[in-house]
Amino acid sequence: MENSVFVLGLLCCWSFQFSTALTNCCHVTRMEWESHVTCSGCQMEDVPQDLPMNTTVLNLWNNRIVELDRDSFTYLPHLKYLILSQNGMYNVSPEAFSSLGNLEYLDLSDNYLEHSAFDSLVFQHLPKLRCLYLHRNHFHLKRLYPENALSFITTLQNLSIDIFDGFTFGKGFLNLTNLGKLDVYRTGAERVSIRNTSFKGLERSVITHLNLDFNMRSIEADSLSPFGSLISLTLDSKKTLSIHEVLLVLYGLRGRNMESIELSQNHVVYSRNGNLEKSDLVFLGTICVRKLDLTRNLISGITMEAVLSWNSRVCLEVLDLSRNVVASPQMLSLLVLFPSITHMYASYEINTFTRKRRGVWSRKTTVFLPTSLRYLYLSHDPSHFDISDATTVSDSNELRVLDVSYPIGGITCSGGYINGLVHLQELNISGWKCTNPNTQFFAKFPNLSRLEAKECYLGSRLSLDGNTLFTGMYNLSIIDLAFNSIKSLNLKTFEDQSYSLKVLNLTGNDMDRLPLESLTFLRVLEILDLRDNLITTLSDTECSFLDVYGSNLDKFKIMLAGNPLVCNCDNLDFVAWLHTTKTVYDRDHLSCSTPGGDTIKIADFLESFEDFQDSCVAQFWLLISIILTVVCILMGILSRLAWQHSVWVRVRCRQPLKHDVYPYDIFISYCDQDSGWVMKTLVPWLDEKGIGYCAGDKNFSPGLYEADNIMEAIDNSCQIVFVVSCTFLEREWPLFTMKLASTYSFREGRENMNIIIMLNDMKRSEFPKLLRKNWDVIRPVQWPDDSNTDQSRLTKAREQFWKCLLKRIKRGNSRFKPAAVSESKL
């Protein structure tokens, strides 16, 4: 026992030593007791000698190993699978496979091997070989097979080989008594004729599966008779023989019981389509076949006479007439003649008619189906179905699956419905025009468990209040509503599927958020597919809902790939949720757009998420700081403007100074247009009378704001004299001064504080409201009109003006003694 363990350890160490020396192009997959080595496309010219001894699979596809010598596989006694295809190989040494006693699978296809490349004893050391692939070689050049070499492989079960025109499987193949599958291909452009003697050498074999896939010139009727054990036949003439010619070759199989017959692409290019007649089915009618495939044969139909003469049709369970030109209504009407049929395929039919054909489902019609039929596939059919009224399927039907998707010509489910399919479990109506479907359309299928309705224009209908499309369908477990332009779902859309719906596909719609209202009803949902919608992020409420939903349902998964997700600072919570949640099935396939405009995979973004989160926090506080700074600056500016321009604010926020003796007797307020009169007329008079005054140009402090200078002047003057003209009240600062002084005076009860000299005749209504209210108290002093031509009267009026003005000034100023002049004289 100890010696065995020691030897095994040495073998493992030796194997590891050699495997590490392999070229980087090779890939080694190690298992417990064996190794699989792949060296594809490595440009090798020889079989590598440094392979692990326990190699069981060796793939040398697409190299340059043009010749196999006797030492090619000396150290690989455990090899079972060997692939040497596409190497340009032209010779094989007689001892090349002498060490491969356990080889079961050998692929020598796609090389330059001729019959002379194989010595008669080359395969004698392969007692376990079961599969041999020799197709796409050069046997056709000399039109000979290496029969002597092949005769030693008595264990062979699968053979793939080329044929050529005039080929014959001779006596060398008689020893292949275990051969069960034969795949026959063609090399070159020539067509091949199959004679009655072509397969004579295979009559001792037990071939059950035969595949004939090549261009044919002709095929004789009894050529398949050597295959006494055949149960599966595939015959594809590549559009070189018509289906009528191919059906005649079934003569050699007459009276057999077969699993499947596939006769595909058997029509001559540019030939006209036609019906299968009684004469075409004379030999097929004798074969009891379970599955019959007649796709791509340009068959336009089967006559009633032919079907009635088909004696063995009772055996047929699966019939595939897809991609022909069969009119579905005509074929469906014949189905009742096949008592055992379970599957019927008539999809992708070619419409070669220019006139519109009326479909099987028309107004108030009844369709009869055989009771054995379970699956009916009519997708991409060119017939123009019309179910604008009630269509009834016979009550005796047991149909389980119906596929009528993507009809060519269109079907509408508005107005009509289908009766009778009470046992239907799967329905595919993708591509129908269901903008306004009949409310009872789906209710007619009470046992439906799977519904596919992609591209059916159901978006507007599903969002309406009172939607009852799926009402009463308590067995629906899979609903596919992809590409229906759905923006939202009605609250109770899936109310009756609360305990049945497991898969909901909403791919390719226009939803920008989760349909939470509808999901709340679903108690067993496992997959919610929202790929390729318009979702940019999920709110905290939606994320929390999914987490709770997933915790209650262990199998629940949501798919979000293809949505325009956004990874920015506003969506930090959503991105963080993606990092931790287990409910998103396709997280590794999600992408999002970054603030820089780039698109990045979520998985890559999450690797640097913490750094991004820190930058977002810094940006947040920077933004807050900027906002607060801006607000403070704006408040300061607004406060300054209010202080500068608002009389009310200044009056409330600043009390006038109180002096026992004011620095100035009067403050003169005037506009620039009246400065000439003030300086040449008023100021000389004030100087003469010894009245101290403050005027803007003379006493204002330079650099101080205008409003502040005015406030200082008002506070330091006993009275304010306003020189008012027509332009005075149009100027900002003179008017501001008048409003401010008026508010001061009347608030403090100093009505004598204000003196108004009017240079022009002005109306009372033109003055500020407070002045108008106290007009009788203020009583402005009017400067005489200079246009008066009577000089004596003008002089007298001016004298009277100066006396009145002097009296006003003295009356409001305590440092002057009261004037003896009476008001009436003024």
Image (cartoon, grey):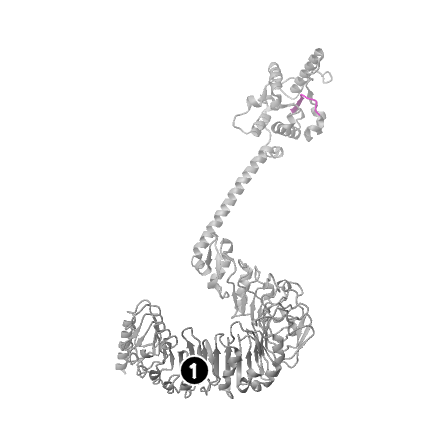
Q: 355 left or right of 528?
A: right
The structure residue drawn at horizontal position 52% and vertical position 44%, both measured from the top left corner, is 628
In magenta segment, residue 777: no
239 and 786: which is toward the camera: 239
The amino acid marked with disc number 1 is Lys
Q: Quadrant of the N terminus?
A: bottom left
Residue 235, given in percent of the width and then of the height, sits at 48, 79
Say which quarter of the image contains residue 465. bottom right
Decide which of 534, 313 is in the foreground and name it.
313
Q: Secondary structure at mark 1?
A: strand
Q: Is residue 671 visible?
A: yes
Res. 156 image quadrant: bottom left
Q: Is 177 placed above or below 614 here?
A: below
Q: Residue at x 56, y 35 (%)?
A: 640
Question: Is residue 754 rendered magenta in the image?
Answer: yes
Q: Position of residue 796 (x, y in %)?
A: 70, 13
Q: Quadrant of residue 773?
A: top right
Is residue 393 rendered to the left or right of residue 596? right
Q: Is residue 293 visible?
A: no
- Residue 144's place in the image compared with 756, above or below, is below
Residue found at x 40% / y 84%: 179
Label 1 sits on residue: 181
Percent across and percent down for residue 655 are 60, 31
Residue extending farthest to the top is 792
Query: In the image shown, does 202 or 478 lie closer to the viewer?
Result: 202
Question: Which stretch did the figure color magenta?
Answer: 753-762
Instruction: Give the image location of residue 593, x and y in percent.
Output: 49, 56
Looking at the rendered image, the quarter that the C terminus falls into is: top right
Using a 10 Å C-alpha cutoff, classify the residue at mark 1 as few (fewer than 14 neighbours), some (14 to 19) or many (20 or more): many
